[in-house]
Image (cartoon, helix red, strand yellow):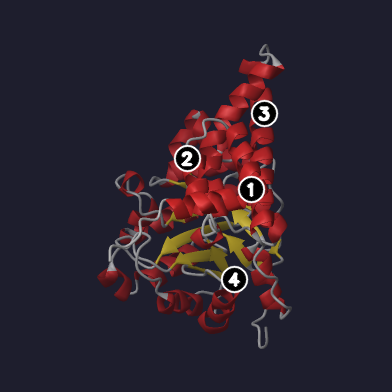
Amino acid sequence: MPNAPSSAPIRLGNSVTIEVPVLLAPMAGVTDGVFRSLCREAGAGYATTEFARDEALLRGVRQQVDLTDLRLDARPVGVQIFGANPDVMRRAAGWVMATAAPDVLDINMGCPAPKVTNGQGGSSLLRDPDRAEAIVRAVVAEVSPAPTTVKIRVGWDDAHRDAGIAVEVARRAVDAGAQMITVHGRTRQQRYEGVACWDTIAAVAAAVPVPVIGNGDVQTPADAVHRLRTSGCAGVAIGRGARGRPWLFGQIAAALRGDPVPPDPELPARLALGLDHVRRQVAFEIACLEDDPANARKARATIEELADGRALGHLLPHVMWYVWGAPGANEARRVLSKARTAVELADILADYAAHPEAYHRRDDARVVPARA
């Protein structure tokens, strides 16, 4: 791609270098360890975990602790946490560094979900810059010299965005020691609707002396090149655009180097990736169960059965995304939705790969002809 922008590495202090400035954005229920590993192998330069609640980590809540498991991750990798109390966030950050040992500790100030914002965490911190700054300062003091980074949105609503709150919070976070700011270009009110405001992202990039990562509406290599060329950002983060498309990172990396962009994989390759994803998820669940002392006396067959069931919840959204838009996808998704185990998911994907025309015919058969 001619006139590609710089693909210079992103450096956080003296300890962390992100070689490829194309990042996987954290998404709750999506960016688990297996998906992160697939995206990194495909070309993503960095990934951050799904966010974990600070208080739950300190209480040892298994579901939240599991979010910090980095055994499948390439380095560098970040763990993201959220909360509203500076001291609790400080202690949770310390626990994460001591237990999971990530390269970076990331603070979520962008989540729009009411269950997060009602507790004054996530994007509600944009309405309380004093508290936001205090949290960053406390976490930096706890985890240094490891870098602390922060993810924000452009504001709570349009008026909040237009008043320049993203620039204010970003500046205060950097003053408190944050070494990178990621900006999602939507307001909390927008959630994930509408279009991202890259003008505000660019304003943040111009206002702070640390790398700024732009996030929002990057769906193609051309989108990434355009945003890096025009925003002043050091990198882009891909969220929903990567669902079912880990190969997008390699395509963007090629575009940034000025190399030919590889085409999207054909359906057989996509389904092969889906099958690999299923296998990896089941293997990961087996490893986790075997590490739990509570399962020490369980037979291998029991462990495998438990792992198969646990894997299903992680896998179903991903396999749906892998088949999205392909011929016969509607029928494939209907059949996949009825799977009750990961083994069944794999069997359906394999059957779809072997007989795609049968799924296509069944899709066509459900089309009702228009009346004359």
- At x 50%, y 33%, the residue is 63
The answer to which of marks 3 and 2 sits earlier in the sequence is 3
User: Which element is circle 3 on?
Assistant: helix
The answer to which of marks 1 and 2 sits earlier in the sequence is 2
The answer to which of marks 3 and 4 sits earlier in the sequence is 4
Q: Name the outermost residue toward the bottom.
A: 3
User: Which element is circle 2 on?
Assistant: loop
Q: Which residue is mark 3?
A: 286
The answer to which of marks 4 and 2 sits earlier in the sequence is 4
Q: Name the outermost residue toward the left.
A: 159
What is the x, y in percent for residue 243? 54, 56
Relative to the observer, which residue lies in front, 124 or 22? Answer: 22
Q: Amino acid at mark 4?
A: Gly
Q: Quadrant of the N terminus?
A: bottom right
In this rendering, is residue 266 above or below 283? below
Q: Looking at the image, can residue 222 be seen? A: yes
Mark 3 residue crowding within 10 angstroms, few (<14) / some (14–19) / many (20+): many
Q: Name the outermost residue toward the top.
A: 297
- At x 67%, y 11%, the residue is 297
Q: Which residue is mark 2?
A: 337
Q: Which residue is mark 1?
A: 355
Label 3, label 4: how far apart the Cα atoms are = 36 Å
- Foreground tag (3 vs 1): 1
What is the x, y in percent for residue 158? 28, 70
- Foreground tag (3 vs 4): 3
Q: Which residue is mark 4?
A: 235
